[in-house]
Amino acid sequence: MNLAKKNLKLKVDNRIFIKIIKPNEVTKSYVQWLKDYEVTKYTDQNKYSHSLASTKSYVSQKFNSENDRPILTETIADGFSHIISQ
């Protein structure tokens, strides 16, 4: 994926935007959110054990791939992010 696409940011409104998550943006709170059963109960993610290292590795693989779709996040102005597409 080229650099312009990696920096793509779509504004939904004044508080919310959608962007491609970068490996350095994966945090402990992001992983905790990913471990929340209520968040992942309808996805395959609830079958995996997530750690900071494994999540950064997965995001890095998707971010740097020419063939895989990037992981999109919805981010609210206060800084909270979550995955909306894999």
Image (tube, grey):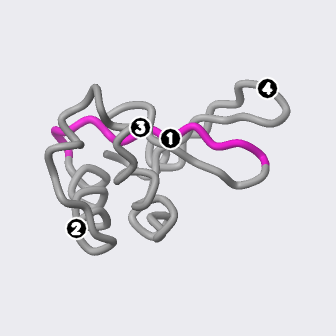
Label 2 neighbour load within 10 Å: few <14, some 14-19, many 20+: few
Element at label 3: helix
Question: Within the magenta stretch, is there residue 72?
Answer: yes
Residue at (33% x, 72% y) in the render: 52
Q: Which residue is nearer to you in this view: 17 or 64?
A: 17
The residue that label 1 is drawn on is: 73
State the CA–CA distance, disc 4 to disc 1. Answer: 15 Å
Task: Please state which amino acid type lies under the numbered disc 4.
Answer: Asp
Task: Please state which amino acid type lies under the numbered disc 3.
Answer: Val
Task: Please state which amino acid type lies under the numbered disc 2.
Answer: Ser
Question: Within the magenta stretch, is there residue 23?
Answer: no
The residue that label 4 is drawn on is: 13
Element at label 1: strand
Work out which quarter of the rendered image holds the N terminus and state it: top left
Q: Quadrant of residue 86?
A: top left
Task: Please state which amino acid type lies under the numbered disc 1.
Answer: Thr
First of labels 3, 1 by sequence position? 3
Is 9 on the left or on the right of 56, as rendered?
Answer: right
For the residues bearing labels 3 and 2, Cβ distance under 8 angstroms: no
Query: Which residue reaches farthest front?
Result: 38
The residue that label 2 is drawn on is: 54
Q: Which residues fall within the magenta stretch? A: 66-77
Q: Position of residue 27 (x, y in %)?
A: 48, 68
The residue that label 3 is drawn on is: 39
Residue at (33% x, 41% y) in the render: 70
Q: Which residue is nearer to you in this view: 12 or 47?
A: 47
State the CA–CA distance, disc 4 to disc 2. Answer: 32 Å
First of labels 4, 2 by sequence position? 4
Q: Nearer the viewer, mark 3 or mark 2?
A: 3
Q: Position of residue 63 (x, y in %)?
A: 31, 53
Element at label 4: loop
Q: Nearer the viewer, mark 3 or mark 1?
A: 3
